[in-house]
Structure formats: C-alpha cells, structure tokens
Image (cartoon, grey):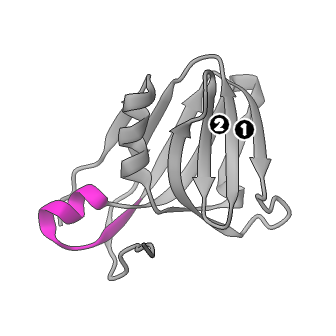
Amino acid sequence: MPTGKLKLMAGDAADLQVISAAIQDALVAVKDCAFLGDERRFAMLVNRYRWEAEQVSGQGSRTHAALVFNEVTGVRHRNVPLGQPDRVLELLAVVEDGPGTVRLDFAADRSIRLEMARLACHLEDVGEPWPTPWKPAHPV
C-alpha cells in the first residue's frame, strides 16, 4: 500500500476542485469540526478515503487528514446536528459558492458555508493509512 502522505493547498476554485476530489467521501464527527474565530480559521479532522492510493495499488485505504480554511470571517450551517457531537457526517464535496464563500456539502442535505476574506485552504494527511475493504459508492 502506498504510504505517501497527501499535502495540498488551494488558492482558487480550480485548486479547490482538486481538494474536493481528494476528500470526497471523508467521514467527520460533528465534534471534530471547529471555527476558531480569534484565528479566523475553520478546521476539520477527517477520516479520508485515499482515492489516489487505490488507483496505484488497487486496494482501499483510509487515513486521518486535516482540512483547514484560513481567513474565515463567518460560518453558517444547514441541518448539521450540533447537539449530537458524536454524529458522523459524510463529506461529498467542497465547492466555491460565489465570491468569498465555500460550501462543504454532506450527505443527508447537510452543509457548512464558510465566508472568507480570500480562499486559503489546505489539506494534509496527519496519520498513517490503514487498509479498508469498504469502498465508498453512490447510486447513479
């Protein structure tokens, strides 16, 4: 199994599409999402399916990764169960949602919208990968 750790940065919409593809189907507990207002930062610790490693090895694996947005001035959410901190959400996409906004789309019609002074995002694997027999799949 390839052990290279992914480390990506996004400064524009095209870069963000690459991060979105890399983090598609990540799992994140509500308690692992945080807006650090004093630092103007929104961060999530996720359990990421390693799509890029599967293409090389043909085997599924996951790893922990940090998804961080800087220059965040506000955070809004829709249908995120804040009262259930252990609830796990499935991240489907990260998209630019107009000038100065990024939307994190989750399964079950949930989303988090970040208002930003400018797009400044990075994704970095922070753990060692482990094999998994479960590959995320979506009905067509």
Residue holding disc 2: 42
Q: Quadrant of the C terminus?
A: bottom left
Residue farthest toward the front in the current orientation of the protein: 140
- For residue 126, say whether it is visible: no
- For residue 58, say whether it is visible: yes
Horizontal and vertical percent for residue 122? 45, 34
- Which amino acid, by three-letter code, is at mark 1? Phe
Q: Secondary structure at mark 1?
A: strand
- Which amino acid, by three-letter code, is at mark 2? Phe
Quarter of the image for residue 13 reads: top left
Vertical position of residue 24 compared to residue 34: above or below: below
The span picked out in magenta is 51-63
Residue at (43, 35) in percent of width and height: 16
Circle 1 crowding by C-alpha within 10 Å: few under 14, some 14–19, many from 20 = some
Residue farthest toward the right in the current orientation of the protein: 83
Horizontal and vertical percent for residue 54? 22, 65
In the image, is 60 to the left or to the right of 34? left
Residue at (32, 63) in percent of width and height: 129
Residue holding disc 1: 35
Q: Quadrant of the N terminus?
A: bottom left
Label number found at residue 129: none
Q: Earlier in the sequence, mark 2 or mark 1?
A: 1
Residue at (67, 34) in percent of width and height: 114
Horizontal and vertical percent for residue 68? 54, 37
Circle 2 crowding by C-alpha within 10 Å: few under 14, some 14–19, many from 20 = many
Quarter of the image for residue 70 reads: top right
The reply to whether discs 2 and 1 touch (Cβ–Cβ < 8 Å) is yes
Quarter of the image for residue 3 reads: bottom left
